[in-house]
Image (tube, grey):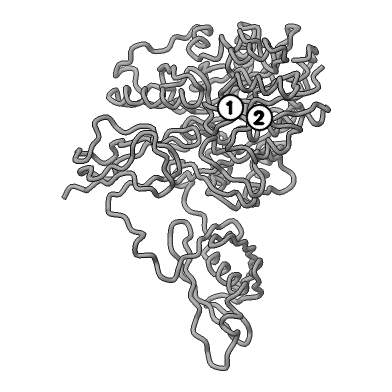
Amino acid sequence: MITSLLVANRGEIACRVFRTCRELGIRTIAVHSDADEGALHARVADASVRLPGEAPADTYLRGDLIVKAAVAAGADAVHPGYGFLSENADFARAVQDAGLIWIGPPPEAIEAMASKTRAKQLMGIQPLSHVTEADLPVLVKAAAGGGGRGMRVVRHLADLDAELASARAEAASAFGDGEVFVEPYVENGRHVEVQILADTHGTVLPLGTRDCSLQRRHQKVVEEAPAPGLPEELQEELSTLAVRAARAVDYVGAGTVEFLVADGRAHFLEMNTRLQVEHPVTEAVFGLDLVAEQLRVAEGHPLDNDPPRARGHAVEARLYAEDPSRDWAPQTGRLHRLSVPEGVRLDTGYTDGDDIGVHYDPMLAKVVAHAPTRAEALRKLASALERVVIHGPVTNRDLLVRSLRHPEFTAARMDTGFYDRHLPELTTPATDPHAPLAAALADAHTGSRSRFGGWRNVPSQPQVKRYAMAGEEHEVHYRYTRQGLEAEGVRVVHADSGLVVLEVAGVQRRFTVTRYDDHFYVNNTALTALPRFPDPTAQHAPGSLLAPMPGTVVRVADGLTVGTAVKAGDPLLWLEAMKMQHKITAPATGTLSALHAVPGQQVEPGALLAVVTEAS
């Protein structure tokens, strides 16, 4: 029987596994990098062991250090979570060789399926060994790992070598394995997967389908169970193929078999020999705790041959610290506050006051809603996300709300190209025109009123405040009178440092205002107070390429030097942040007149990387 368990992972999944362990009376042990010393997963565990360093390659990818940590902390079992070492057969063997219980499938099953090239061969599918124009478009894919890392769509043969190199570098950084392969790219297919659960007694249970078609950078954003609108025959075929894949490798534990569905046909993608990020939607529909089932299977208990019946519909949205309007650029900084309304499930590895760093995935949390029907579940989740309080880095929250309400998605007509088609309309800034005024009135109540002496017998000059909101500057005017604060076009019903009530066209609206230094949050709108006189030194030459995020320069384009002629859109260099590589391209056609970036260099947001002088 398992009495003490170490999770070889971090963040949200570690916290989620610990939650089940506490319910079962199992002692919990975390591992943490130096960057994660104060992280939530390290704080909520009964014990935590330091992995010296910050980068994943020095910490969470060091299986030898994690096994030593488990032994030193007195663990009798290791759960890999997902990502990092969860699909590493050598790590599974090392855990077992140390006399510990491995919460996962046999190393041989991991080995057979962890390499996507071998998995496809097992299912009778061969990758492309020689790509021609007739094969395009193709998908470059990492053989190990997942989560969209090491994946590139190639539509032009001339781009293949560069994309192969980029995918290898990203895969090596994320998984410690740079092997990639090429396969045909199925356009506009639906990403559908089957959850399986298998024990050591020969039982393999398919636990319904999930649809994960809404993706960016080949990484899932919204998932739901069951996959809507699939014919019954196709559902049966998917379940049959999933069970066949599991039996082919004598699978044990929880796993997922993934497919692309196009033109009514199922195309096998891969088998993930681990728990998936989106497992909560299956838990909600089947009333199961998949982590508890993993632990029971690892202890040798048989599964019930008659699984619970699926009930209702569940939808999960991933909250990312990223800006979808800027090519999904990851965001860092202090997460001042994160809270969700009651009635939905929140899985997160962060809490108020935590810092979002550059070393790990930008996912902040998963929010899950369950309801009797799909339409009710979508409405419930969209409403909850609207009311989520997030004070900190830019997130994809508005994108998620709009996605859940988009007619193509509500009608279940989505596919993996959804964001390629609809991103501009989904990322139009969602701002409230009265938010700057509310911020100014709350700020005035905080200190300005005493400074200006309140109302006067003679009319006072209007007070002026400037704010940045959604990349634009807004100037607001208000004045003090005998009746209190006044502003043109509205009636100020109430104003204090935390709440402003305005009557607009006869309707009273409430604005909750929270301030952190110069940053304001008015309901769900973020604003930054601007100085009265802009700093004249904060200027950059035209054509300047600034770092859009903190990260590491991992590569500069071959042969790129000062004086090189470049074309608009040419890739110049690559930054790595939050386990993904981001391409920085030339803003215009011209000449590279300055190059400050060098491989290995750490840069902060706004750092000057290069300058392109536009051709006259």
The reply to whether discs 1 and 2 touch (Cβ–Cβ < 8 Å) is yes
Residue found at x 65% / y 22%: 80
Work out which residue is located at the far left of the displayed protein and give it. Answer: 616
Position above or below: 439 against 266: below
Which element is circle 2 on? strand
Instruction: Indicate the amino acid at tag 1.
Output: Tyr
Q: Which residue is mark 2?
A: 31
| Relative depth, front residue between 427 and 450 | 450
Q: CA distance from mark 1 to mark 2?
A: 8 Å
Q: Which residue is mark 1?
A: 60
Q: Position of residue 374 (x, y in %)?
A: 66, 36
Instruction: Indicate the amino acid at tag 2.
Output: Val
Position above or below: 385 against 91: below
Position above or below: 195 against 245: below
Left or right: 407, with 200 as reference point = left
Which element is circle 1 on? loop
Residue found at x 78% / y 14%: 299
Q: Position of residue 554 (x, y in %)?
A: 39, 32
Q: Position of residue 531 (x, y in %)?
A: 45, 67
| Relative depth, front residue between 378 and 242 | 242
Q: Position of residue 113 (x, y in %)?
A: 56, 12
Residue found at x 71% / y 49%: 341
